[in-house]
């Protein structure tokens, strides 16, 4: 049980900071924080939408407005978090965990809550995301090569989904939709969905989920409509479940692996490598020299270099990491939902057949409209993998859940990768002489 009191001084992740790098985005989200210094509140932070009133600041348990944060001069919230009660479960109101608060300046995070960004991110209909890890005071996490960090019992990971009214001005008119929470219980991880209620200024634990139409203006200036899925509680496992070493089905975090965390991020105190930051903060042990840690492809590169101008080597790395974070949580040898396909899209899979090369779909899914193979090297258009990544047809689209729109930059990347592979007609019969 966690007993420490959790009094709060703020680390701020401004709404502006959260989205300032959206223009750099390609993989559909900002990856959380920002790449510039605007995470500190300098007064230029964009106002929240009508939907995102500042009611967060009057949330029932977090009246601390008299105090100010030492670093930013911004109002702080006071809270007394005793850790999750493993018998009672998580509270109905997100504010009762005292970890995060949404104000017109954006997110405020409590002590011991560390925002993080990922090099490559999951596409969710262009939603922006803010991610953060809470480590119980005094506890430590263990670094693991190529695996999710071993986080201590009592840890909590939060991921919040935000839609700006116009992706071209992502700092304006933001609508915060949901905060997803993973909690490390003594035996296992458990997943909880919270949906924001802006009248209340809080997010409510809501097991039944919701489908919500969300309109916004895309990067191309055209209106878009997402039929956005707020997953129900038992849909979390469709993506987060794997078989562990003992062949037990367990829920696991997906993103916080060294290769995705290994990047500089600026949360108001200057750009610092995230793994170094955690090691310095004293809660991540066993971090090897940063220079030797592998790095997943950094999606921010697309801001300067569109896919068409990337070297093929970079396209390959980028496409493999895109598949890894967007698909491989189902499509990997330890995956649960997706194993039937025997298609393994994890970045370190070197078996080209299981990667889909000239592989006929084994699974019963609706397939790819007259296409025969998951990947036809050299021919993206003929590849089922491309078709299923781009289609909006419900029986065929990949991922099966979690998107209602196609991701243009993502498919451009995958197309460039497949088109650039040494051509193979997969043993098609010779054309008639
Ligand atoms: C469509 C698949 C999918 C569904 C459904 C899904 N997640 Fe995730 N989730 C992911 C992926 C992929 C990541 C990591 C990549 C990222 O953060 O961009 C992630 C990240 C997270 C994180 C941050 C820590 C981590 O694992 O990387 C939390 C917390 C989280 N999800 C909670 C939930 C909860 C709670 C639900 C159910 C309400 C849920 N997720 C449903 C795919 C999914
Ligand atoms: C939530 C789990 C999940 C995610 C995420 C997911 N898939 Fe799938 N995928 C499945 C399942 C289950 C099947 C088998 C049933 C079917 O074919 O519809 C499948 C089948 C496929 C097939 C047919 C493969 C075969 O050989 O049978 C392709 C191609 C595919 N997925 C591509 C992708 C791509 C590309 C992504 C990422 C953009 C992705 N999937 C993400 C669950 C998932």
Image (cartoon, rainbow, N blue to C red):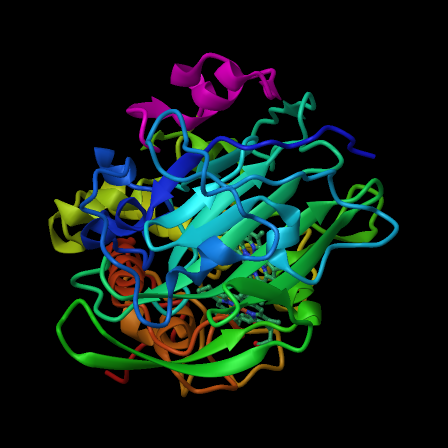
Q: Which residues are magenta?
A: 267-293
Relative to 404, say whether 142 is above or below. Answer: above
Quarter of the image where ligand 2 sits: bottom right
Please indicate whether residue 282 sits to the left or right of residue 268 in the image.
Answer: right
Please count the marks in the image: 0
Residue 354 spot, x, y in % from top left:
55, 56
Residue 421 spot, x, y in % from top left:
29, 54
Q: Measuring 54% from the left and 47% from the top, which residue is drawn there?
A: 63
- Give 99 or 177, whichever is nearer the viewer: 99
Residue 70 spot, x, y in % from top left:
39, 25
- Give 370 or 320, whichever is nearer the viewer: 320
Extreme residue in the right direction: 87
Q: Measuring 41% from the left and 42% from the top, which residue is drawn there?
A: 118
Q: Is residue 336 magenta?
A: no
Please indicate whether residue 124 sits to the left or right of residue 242 in the image.
Answer: left
Residue 247 spot, x, y in % from top left:
82, 49
- Give 55 or 328, whichever is nearer the viewer: 55
Q: Measuring 44% from the left and 19% from the top, which residue is drawn there?
A: 276
In the figure, residue 272 lies in which quadrant? top left
Please indicate whether residue 427 sits to the left or right of residue 342 in the image.
Answer: left
Please indicate whether residue 238 sits to the left or right of residue 230 in the image.
Answer: right
Relative to 380, say whether 54 is above or below. Answer: above
Relative to 112, say whether 413 is above or below. Answer: below
Relative to 284, say whether 160 is above or below. Answer: below
Q: Measuring 43% from the left and 87% from the top, which residue is drawn there?
A: 393
* Residue 52 visible in the snapshot: yes
In the figure, residue 47 lies in which quadrant? bottom left
């Amino acid at each position: 049980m966690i007993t420490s009191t959790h009094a709060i001084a703020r680390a701020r992740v401004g709404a502006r900071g959260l989205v300032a790098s959206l223009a750099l985005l390609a993989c559909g989200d900002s990856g959380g924080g920002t790449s510039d210094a605007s995470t500190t509140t300098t007064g230029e932070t964009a106002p929240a939408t009508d939907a995102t009133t500042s009611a967060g600041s009057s949330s029932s348990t977090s009246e601390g407005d008299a105090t100010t944060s030492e670093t930013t001069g911004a109002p702080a919230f006071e809270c007394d978090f005793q850790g999750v009660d493993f018998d009672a479960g998580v509270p109905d109101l997100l504010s009762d965990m005292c970890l995060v608060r949404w104000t017109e300046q954006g997110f405020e995070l409590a002590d011991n809550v560390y925002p993080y960004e990922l090099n490559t991110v999951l596409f969710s209909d262009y939603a922006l995301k803010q991610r953060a890890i809470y480590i119980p005071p005094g506890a430590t996490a263990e670094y693991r090569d190529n695996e999710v960090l071993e986080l201590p019992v009592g840890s909590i990971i939060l991921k919040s989904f935000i839609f700006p009214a116009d992706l071209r001005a992502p700092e304006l008119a933001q609508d915060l939709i949901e905060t997803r929470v993973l909690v490390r219980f003594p035996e296992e991880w458990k997943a909880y969905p919270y949906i924001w209620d802006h009248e209340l200024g809080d997010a409510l634990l809501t097991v039944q989920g919701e489908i919500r139409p969300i309109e916004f203006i895309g990067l191309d200036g055209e209106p878009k409509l997402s039929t956005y899925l707020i997953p129900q509680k038992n849909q979390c496992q469709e993506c987060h479940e794997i078989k562990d070493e003992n062949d037990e089905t367990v829920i696991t975090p997906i993103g916080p692996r060294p290769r995705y965390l290994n990047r500089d991020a600026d949360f108001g105190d200057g750009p610092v490598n995230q793994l170094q930051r955690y090691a310095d903060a004293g809660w991540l042990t066993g971090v090897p020299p940063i220079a030797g840690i592998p790095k997943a492809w950094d999606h921010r590169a697309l801001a300067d270099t569109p896919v068409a101008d990337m070297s093929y080597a970079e396209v390959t790395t980028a496409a493999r990491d895109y598949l890894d974070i967007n698909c491989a949580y189902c499509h990997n040898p330890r995956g649960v939902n997706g194993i039937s396909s025997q298609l393994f899209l994890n970045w370190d899979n070197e078996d080209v057949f299981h990667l889909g090369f000239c592989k006929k779909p084994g699974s019963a899914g609706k397939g790819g409209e007259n296409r025969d193979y998951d990947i036809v090297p050299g021919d993206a258009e003929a590849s089922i993998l491309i078709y299923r990544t781009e289609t909006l047809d419900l029986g065929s689209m990949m991922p099966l859940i979690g998107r209602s729109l196609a991701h243009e930059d993502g498919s451009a990347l995958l197309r460039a990768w497949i088109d650039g592979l040494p051509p193979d007609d997969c043993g098609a019969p010779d054309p008639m002489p």
